[in-house]
Every structure is written in structure tokens, then in C-alpha cells.
Amino acid sequence: MKQRLTRRSMLAGGAALSAAPVIAALGSGGAGATQHDHGTVGADAAHGHGGHNAGRYHGHAGFPQGSVPPERAGIDPTAILRDFDRGTTSTLPDGRTLREWELFAVDRTFEVAPGVTFDAWTYNGRIPGPTLWAREGDRMRVRFINGSSHPHTIHFHGIHPAFMDGMPGIGEERGGGSIEPGEEFTYEFDAEPFGTHLYHCHQSPLGPHIAKGLYGAFIVEPKQGREPADEMVMVMNGYNIDGGDDNEFYTVNGLPFHFMDHPVQVKRNELVRIHLINVLEFDPINSFHVHANFFHYYPTGTSLQPSEYTDTIAQMQGQRGILEMRFPYTGLYMFHAHKTEFAELGWMGFFEVTDA
Ligand code: CU
Ligand code: CA
Ligand code: CU
């Protein structure tokens, strides 16, 4: 609690002045105001002259701001955006598709903000881990090898037997439960129900095992498929850099401010489908807001009928859903957490809409 108060008072005090341009950018002016401020923001942002834009917007006391070039950071949120791993496929005797993956836990350090490193625990060396994609009813087989320095598991959301649940203490007699460093276990279950899900480590203490980076998206496509779209995954997370029980940075797909410098490229009028997942630790609620547009929202992606038509949704940790929208106009459109503090600490970006 003390840490939290410290950070929040820092934010209220020291950063007040430098945060002013952010508030302007987040206000009614949005991308338009940003464009006026910077003149050439469109070109700069599109071509990613790293940190240039974000550097102008921010300045949270005590931590540098701006996005680290992906190759230096070790995380590339743009690459993660449309990277759906469908596994190695084969056909089972009963005619169903078997999909196989190999996931390994490995400790890795990332430069998440200029000069700021984060000692992470990861699946496959990335944050978030690979986005696993299956079709409803497929058999999924995930071989998990723990090459990390701590015991871990993979706990999948979805429907499966207890011993496949990645819970320490459950299924140990069958090799499951807690997977010690150097050990491995193969999770196997049917892909159900269709929807947008997630997986994460369920070792205790659970907070750090998630906050250190052990999570990823897991998508089950309905049997009948969905309307073709420009499909992408956005995993919302945070980084606790200095200990305590709070985050100093917030991101989509692992790198603060990345999509400010590398806007998500979309085509005018094309259907955009975003699988949005909140794994944020420490803070109870995260949110997503898009400027100058509305989207249909499908909570957990488990229904083909949207529940809401809106421009802002909230998710608690573990909640996720599908957003579908089309951009009728070209230009730069901001998206960000509608919790201003999270936005200012990295959770903001742009869509850049162009004609085909
Ligand atoms: Cu773990
Ligand atoms: Ca902290
Ligand atoms: Cu969970």
C-alpha cells in the first residue's frame, strides 16, 4: 500500500507539468491535436523513429519514457499482434485435428523502457507468450519444458480434466501439477469452448508468477469460423520494476508506448477483429478505448452475437473478449486505457488507417 501511495503521489506531483501534453493528446483533440503539436507526427509515427513522439508526451517522475526499439527491447508488439501459432497439425484416427506445440519456460531480461530492464520469466522467451490458435473440437497437445530457475505450470482457461489444469498439488501422480526446473509435462485436452482465452502459470505465489511474464493468449475458433477479418491479439499487461505491489509501466503486447511510434496499420472499411486480454497484475481493472470509432464487443468471444456497441470497455484480470470494428475514415486514431494513469505510463497507441 505504501509503495502505491508513493508512486501515485509522485505522479500527482513531479509529473504534473510534463503530463500536460498527454492530457491534451488524450482529450477531445485526440490524434488531430497530436498532429498539430508535432506537425509530421503521421510520417514519424508510421516510420517509427523510435521514441520521438512518446518522448514528447511523457515524463513520469523517476522513470524514463518513450518506446525502446523492439530489437533492443527484445519484445516486438507489432510482430506479436498478428502472430497466431496454429501448431503442428496431424489427423487423429477419429478424423479430428491434433495440434501440437512446445512451450518452454525461460528466464530473460528485457529493456522495457529506455535504460530500464525487467527480469522476466517467460514462455518461449517472449512477453506475452505465443498465441495458440485451435479450431473448436481440435485436440491440443502442449509439451511444456521448464528451463526456468523456478517451478512453473501452464494453466489453461477452457474446459479440461483436473490433472490437465496446471494446478500445483493436482494431478502430481500423473506427472502434472507443479513442474520443477528441468522437468516437463504434456498438457492434452480438447479445444473448448470457442472463444478468446488465455493461459498462465499457476504456481504460488501466483501474483509474481503472472507479473513476471508467464501468460499468453489462447484462441479457439468456432467450428463454423468467423467472418474474414484483419485479426489481431492484444494482451494488456504491466511491469513492476521497483518492487512493492504496483506497476510502473503498462502495455499492450509487452512494450510501453510501442504503438505510439509504430501505429497498428489497418485498411479503411476492412473488418478489424481484436482479441483483447487483460492479464494485468496488481491493478484490479484495465480498459480499452478507441478514438473516433465504435466497436461491437463479444465478452470472452463465446457468443456470435455482440453484447455491446461502444467505444470503451473494462476488463478485470483474466477477462477478455473480441472487439470488431471498421474505420470509415483514413488517419491516425488513438487507442489507450481509459484509465489515464495507465495510458500515461505506456498503455497508449495509434491505429493508422489508409486506403487499400
Ligand atoms: Cu510460474
Ligand atoms: Ca513497483
Ligand atoms: Cu487465469
Image: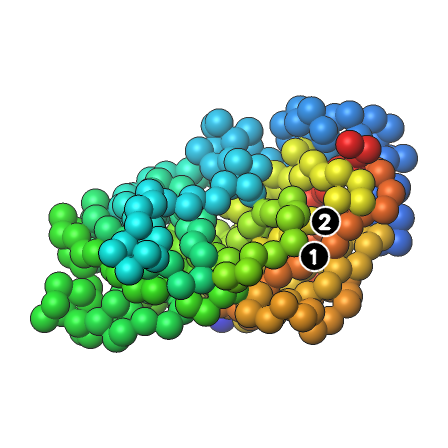
Q: Nearer the viewer, residue 158 or 119?
A: 158
Could you tell me residue 134's position as x and y percent? 43, 54
**Which residue position is annotated with label 1?**
324
The three-letter code of the residue at mark 2 reads Leu
Up-down: is 317 above or below 275? Answer: below
Answer with left or right where residue 57 lies relative to residue 175. right
Disc 1 crowd rating (10 Å Cα; few below 14, some 14-19, many 20+) is some
Q: Earlier in the sequence, mark 1 or mark 2?
A: 2
Q: Separation of disc 1 and disc 2 at Cα? A: 7 Å
Residue 99 visible? The answer is yes
Q: Which of the 4 image quarters holds residue 34?
A: top right
Q: Secondary structure at mark 2?
A: loop
Answer with left or right where residue 297 lies relative to residue 235. right
**Which residue position is annotated with label 2?**
271
Q: Which of the 4 image quarters holds residue 300?
A: bottom right
Q: Are marks 1 and 2 in contact (CB under 8 Å)?
A: yes
Q: Nearer the viewer, residue 266 or 236?
A: 266
Which residue is found at the position 48% from the left and 44% from the top?
84
The three-letter code of the residue at mark 1 reads Glu
Answer with left or right where residue 340 lies relative to residue 240. right
Answer with left or right where residue 349 lies relative to residue 137. right
Could you tell me residue 353's position as x and y percent? 78, 38
Could you tell me residue 68's position as x and y percent? 55, 33
Q: Nearer the viewer, residue 221 or 170?
A: 221
Could you tell me residue 311's position as x and y percent? 77, 62
Q: Please, which colouring scheme is shown? A: rainbow
